[in-house]
Amino acid sequence: MVDLLSVLASGILVGTVYAYMAYGLGLIYGVLRVVNLAHGAFLTLGVYVTWWLNATFGMDPLVSILITVPLGFALGATVERTLVFRLRDSPPVTTLLLLFGVWLIVRNALYLIFGGADRSLLTSYSLESLAVGPLTLSIPRLIVSAFSLLGFVVLALMLKRTWSGLALRAVAQDREAAALSGVPVNRVWAVAFGIGSALAMSAGSLMSLFYSVTPEFGARFLLKSFCVVVLGGLTNIGGILVAGIGLGIAEDLTAFYIHTGYRDVVSFLVLTAALVMRRADSD
Amino acid sequence: MSSFARRQLLLGLGAIAGLALIAPLLLANPYSSRLAQLLFLNILLASAWNLVGGFAGQISFGNASLFGVGAYATSMLWLAGFHPFLTMPAAAVLAALYGVAWGWPCLRLRGPYFAIATIGVAEATRIVANHIEAAGGASGLTLPLEQDLGPVLLYALGAVLAVAAVLVSAAVRRSRLGLGLIALREDAQAAAASGVNVARQQVTVFAITAALTGLAGSYYAVFTLYIVPEKVFGFDLSISLVLMVLVGGIGTVMGPVLGAGIYLFLEQFVLASLADIHLAAFGALLIFIILLEPRGAAPRLAQFVRLIRRRVG
């Protein structure tokens, strides 16, 4: 019983991070109708920037969010302006391949700069834990989970309450109608790509607290992000949160009761099953 | 026999005869015969990928799962005592079955959704393959070196497989099936409304793709004599197929052949000297093709040939 409870608790904690990590992918898809394969690149860049800041200046990963967010925004908006924008009228698969190219370049750059070795980041609280009744919860996971939820609230408020949020939602709903009502669609696209990338990079900052840092980091979590986004509904904040937690729990149950090696199989199978069941057959 | 079939058969025999003529040149040393084997392998794989990726417009990032099934089928049967030639039909059938098993549900998706679903299937397959101890687990299988078929037989086998794949591709392109797929690629709803059985046609062509990809896996196992899950089920393999076809010319019969050659050349001669940046080089190539030459090299080459003809004639 305690086993099951602690598996569930850790699943929930991981799940909130999954949801936060995936949200940028959903936002970009919602506004631009583009499948951002470079999401993996931004996640990986986030982990590396955070690790580097920590290794060089001893900066806390949570503080480095103040750097990864604006950096992610700038990089994302640049990719949109220079590359994605040119393909705005092409079939979505072309953009997907283009962004895959971006990811290959980033991965290679990271291999060149940092090498392929696994690195990890240790803070004063990395190994701390908190006893809640019969459960032992890891402090970094609690913190990261709290930050993810906070990020979600900020984002939801931004989308609901601000003019930029309104413009994003308008373009997501109907690009032409939004353009006719005076929404600067081009700028909204760049902003959406920027926000999506900022979310991915800051998710990398958070995740550096308990995942090892390698150039392949993004490959693993890109597919999980897809899984969460497809399960939860591409732009549905609440759905994404539930899907993230669901995936976290499903993975931890598999790892605990079946085999640790099969942890990642769950997300891939769930991803495919979710896609097929949704029959999202719009091009 | 229709005039098309007769012509294709003659072209195929001509290609085989041509490949037989230049065989002594390519079999001169182990390196050049390995290059020939890799070229045949690439042609087979790229042509197979193009059937569903080019004609039907369904971009698959998961063909490695089919390749791996073929490679493992041949290796395990060979180790069980069957002659490698006898294992090849089994590899094709098993790969086709596996392809239909996941293609049937996934092909209902279109565009980017299909592409992502194929990544999911292929990665799940790779992880599971790493954990099957009966198949050697993560360390893979080593095949009986002493039973190596020898360069001449491997060359002949590869040549026949590659030419057959191109002929299949040409036949599909011209058939009712191929026309249905192209209609589907251009406009799925209109195709369905005009009586194209969208679901069945896609699954049929995917079964052909899977069988050919399985044969490729089988051929790979036979000439490398060593397979590991990370390689034969690897994502890199799936990506290389997409690149080959895009470079050569997607949706054409000769594009994949051209792309297979260009890719092999790049891999062997350009990237060998740039090993550190080969991922970035492929990424840059991908971006370059998509932004500037989305139809690949084949249309350019055709243009060039027409120009020469006009000059000469």
Image (cartoon, coloured by chain):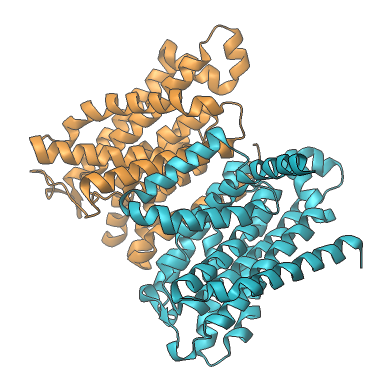
Q: Is residue A147 left or right of residue B77?
A: left
Q: Position of residue A90 (x, y in %)?
A: 61, 31
Q: Quadrant of the N terminus of chain B?
A: bottom right
Quarter the C terminus of chain B occupies: top right
User: Quadrant of residue A154 in the image?
Assistant: top left
Query: Looking at the image, which residue is at 36% across and 68% down?
Result: A259
Give the image quarter of residue B31: bottom left
Compared to residue B228, the image places residue B113 above or below, namely: above
Could one spot residue A243 in this view of the protein?
no
State the residue lying farthest toward the top.
A182
Drawn colour of chain B?
Answer: cyan
The answer to whether any part of residue B303 appears in the image is yes
Q: Colour of chain A?
A: orange
Q: Pinpoint residue A199: horizontal percent, then vertical percent.
A: 34, 31
Residue displayed at 87% across by 60% down: B4
* Residue A5 left/right relative to B27: left
Along the viewing direction, whichever of A228 and B97 lies nearer the viewer? B97
Indicate the position of residue A147 as horizontal and vertical percent values. 26, 33
* Vertical position of residue B256 compared to residue B158: above or below: above
- Identify the residue at horizontal 44%, vertical 21% (top origin): A190
Query: Residue drawn 52% across and 84% down?
Result: B150
Q: Nearer the viewer, residue A7 or B48?
A: B48
Q: Nearer the viewer, residue B4 or B220?
A: B4
Image coords of residue A107 (percent x, y):
34, 45
B303 to B154, vertically: above or below: above
